[in-house]
Amino acid sequence: MTSPEMHPQRWGDPARATALPDAAAGLIELAFGGLDDRPAVSSVELPPVGLDADQLATVRRIVGDEHVLTGDEDRRLRTRGKSTPDLLRARAGDLTDAPDAVVRPATHDEVADLLRFCQEHEVALVPFGGGTSVTGGLVARREGYAGVLSLDLVRMKRLVDVDPVSMTATLEPGLRGPEAEALLAEHGVTIGHFPQSFEFASIGGFAATRSSGQSSAGYGRFDALVVRLTVATPQGTLQVGSAPANAAGPDLRQLMLGSEGAFGVITAVTVRVRRVPAEKVYEGWRWPSFLDGAAAMRTLAQAGLLPTVIRLSDESETAINLARPDEIGAEGAAGCLMITGFEGEPEAVAAKRAAVTAVLTGLGGTPAGEEVGQAWAHGRFNAPYLRDSLLDVGVLVETLETATFWSNLQALYDGVKTALETTLGDPTMVLCHISHVYETGCSLYFTVATKEGEQPVEQWLAAKAAASDAMMAAGATITHHHAVGTDHKQWFATEIGPVGVNILRAVKAELDPTGILNPGVLIP
């Protein structure tokens, strides 16, 4: 199974791009007073390649002539990520951040050789997995460098090993989510990591951004699944993870997880795996209010009864059916929709489902049936395509997320929502759901839609800054699973404080003294 290339100006597979569905179009016209035609620029000119012939020849000697790509289409496909500002710039014809060349190594040693080349020639290197970053994580600072290389890990796609006794698997970083799961399924195992970006994101990207999937309640966040890493750094190879757990000082795996290519290039990842579930059941529940549903989630988490999947839409998100992307705009029910999912052996699924049902019923939840849950499961990877359809008609759409402790949930929810509505003005829709749940707290995932102004990038950045300020004021994190990139650096510095910033700068200076690795990303 090979994942298709994503469109340079849109999300996902170009073959799946569709016009705005009639029901959604009706909702948008009602909310925003009509639709505008905002097509993307069809012809985009890229800046010339900045590396000279001798430099390119050296790179070709490392990876082979056919694996150094300087054509416009190849460079275009490796320009930036998929945040709304990224797409707005691309749609307007701005691809000034295009790399000078796309380089595709096949081995750890080739990656190491490329790092040495970049050090010697002061060339910035941007690791590229699936290109799904939504926080500016693929926008390297060009100033002060002879050029920029996109380190495309697409050739590093092996399933290196499966240990059926320890239940671990070692994978190379270029495997996309579906590719990895297909290879593992041949051995009867799964990682169980299914973020919304699953179809295009890579194993290396999951690790480098500390990704969290929609089944994290049952399988865990990706960083919790990683038991071993191999990393190529400008100072040499780092291998971390000699046992399931240890007390051998600070855990250097955690230093590399979430490092976003700023400390090194992850070339192998060993993760915990589980048996492919024999049964999967998804169902819906209705709650009178968002707080009622959140209290039920907290009860399940603190009782050790979390299902594999659990998410809760607030009243606004429920009303427009955002949890069921294929039915956006159709009339939704009142209250709040919760989705629960159970995966495993039939006996275990039945037991967990019965226990969860008893708790939720006792707390006032109303079962909504399996059809609701199956509709969510069927459409859960489709929502990003809707954003492109909305941008086509002049509606600015973006998402942001955060996390906090249960006792702070209401203050954070109110603060972020108010900041977005105040900054963007009427008409603006702010929707929210709880996407990940823990014993001590949860994440909040906001979707924002507003009428696109004359300067949509600046319009969104102002709103994002206000929302980020609200997160900091509430004592929450700037990101639960989208990572830092360039967009979150200012607030990341606030979150970790000056001592934390100095620690990261010291690590960067030691591992990457010439600053070639993804410059401008992560480090405040």
Image (tube, rainbow, N blue to C red):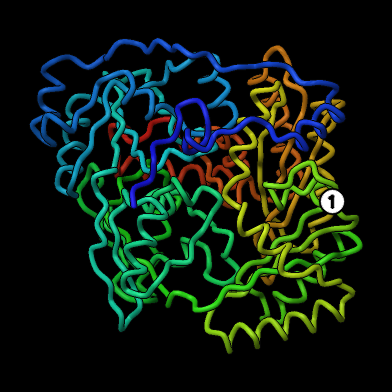
Q: For numbered disc 1, what is the local secondary structure?
A: loop
Q: Which residue is drawn at 71% across and 52% down?
A: 323
Q: In this view, does 509 lie to the left or right of 351?
A: left
Image-quadrant location for residue 60: top left
Outermost residue, front direction?
22
Instruction: Classify mark 1: residues with Cα within 10 Å, few (<14), some (14-19) or many (20+).
Output: some
Q: In this view, does 279 lie to the left or right of 504?
A: right
Residue closest to the eye, 233 or 59: 59
Q: Residue at x 33, y 81 (%)?
A: 166
Q: In this view, does 111 lie above or below 95?
A: below
Q: Is residue 305 left or right of residue 501?
A: right
Counting every numbered tag in the picture gives: 1
Q: Residue 69 in the image: x percent, y percent?
A: 23, 26
- Amino acid at circle 1: Gly
Q: In this view, does 359 lie above or below 249?
A: below
Q: Is residue 134 above or below residue 321?
A: above
Q: Residue at x 65, y 88 (%)?
A: 351
Can the viewer see residue 12?
Answer: yes
Residue closest to the eye, 182 or 156: 182
The residue pinned by badge 1 equals 332
Q: Residue 155 in the image: x percent, y percent?
A: 24, 45
Q: Residue at x 64, y 34 (%)?
A: 387
Image-quadrant location for residue 135: top right
Q: Residue 244 in the image: x percent, y percent?
A: 37, 76
Image-quadrant location for residue 463: top right
Q: Residue 375 in the image: x percent, y percent?
A: 68, 58
Can the viewer see residue 524?
Answer: no
